[in-house]
Image (tube, rainbow, N blue to C red):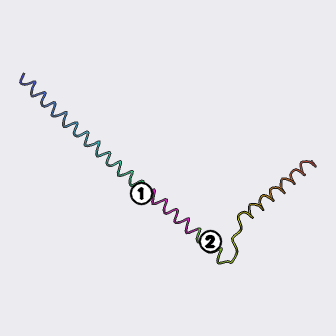
Amino acid sequence: MVHAFFVGRALAAAVSEQAEQVMTDALSNLGKFDAEQRDSLRRFADDVIARAQHEEATAQTTAASTASTGEPLPDLQATIDALRAEVAQVRAALQHYRASA
């Protein structure tokens, strides 16, 4: 009977140590995962900001070179209207071609 008591007590201590080890490992892995995700998010944000700065610098360079040549920037609506007129001319020519063929 005394032997069973000590076996039970040793079993309880061993189970407690195992549970503590498992819990420590789980929390450690969770901490590592959190740190890796934060680092990944920080690198992603830095990459996005670097791309935005690069595109902004490119746009400013393009605008500066256009301004330095003295050419006025094209009117966007006028360009769209011109393209629509060209498409209409192509459609008319295509219909004329189909009608004569």
Image-based side of 18 in relation to 54, left or right: left
User: Residue tagged by mark 2?
Assistant: 63
* Magenta segment, prevailing SS (helix, strand or loop): helix
- Label drawn at residue 42: 1
The residue depicted at 39 percent of the width and 50 percent of the height is 37
Q: How crowded is mark 1: few (under 14 residues within 10 Å), some or many (20 or more)?
A: few
Residue extending farthest to the right is 100
The residue depicted at 58 percent of the width and 70 percent of the height is 60
Is residue 22 covered in magenta? no
Element assignment for label 2 = helix
Image-based side of 48 in relation to 58, left or right: left
Identify the amino acid type marked 2. Ala
Residue 77, image x, y percentages: 72, 63
Residue 41, image x, y percentages: 42, 54
* Relative vertical location of residue 56 with respect to residue 94 in this rendering, above or below: below
- Determine whether label 2 and label 1 are within 8 Å by CB: no
Front-lying residue, 37 or 71 = 71
Image-based side of 101 in relation to 64, left or right: right
The residue depicted at 80 percent of the width and 56 percent of the height is 87
* Relative vertical location of residue 66 with respect to residue 6 in this rendering, above or below: below
Q: In the rendered image, which quarter contains the N terminus?
A: top left
Residue extending farthest to the left is 2
Identify the amino acid type marked 1. Arg
User: How far separated are the C-alphas under marks 2 and 1?
Assistant: 31 Å
The residue depicted at 81 percent of the width and 59 percent of the height is 85
Element assignment for label 1 = helix
Q: Quadrant of residue 4?
A: top left
Image-based side of 98 in relation to 10, left or right: right
- Sequence-wise, which precedes: disc 2 or disc 1? 1
Residue 34, image x, y percentages: 35, 49
Residue extending farthest to the front is 77
Q: What stretch is highlighted in magenta?
A: 43-58
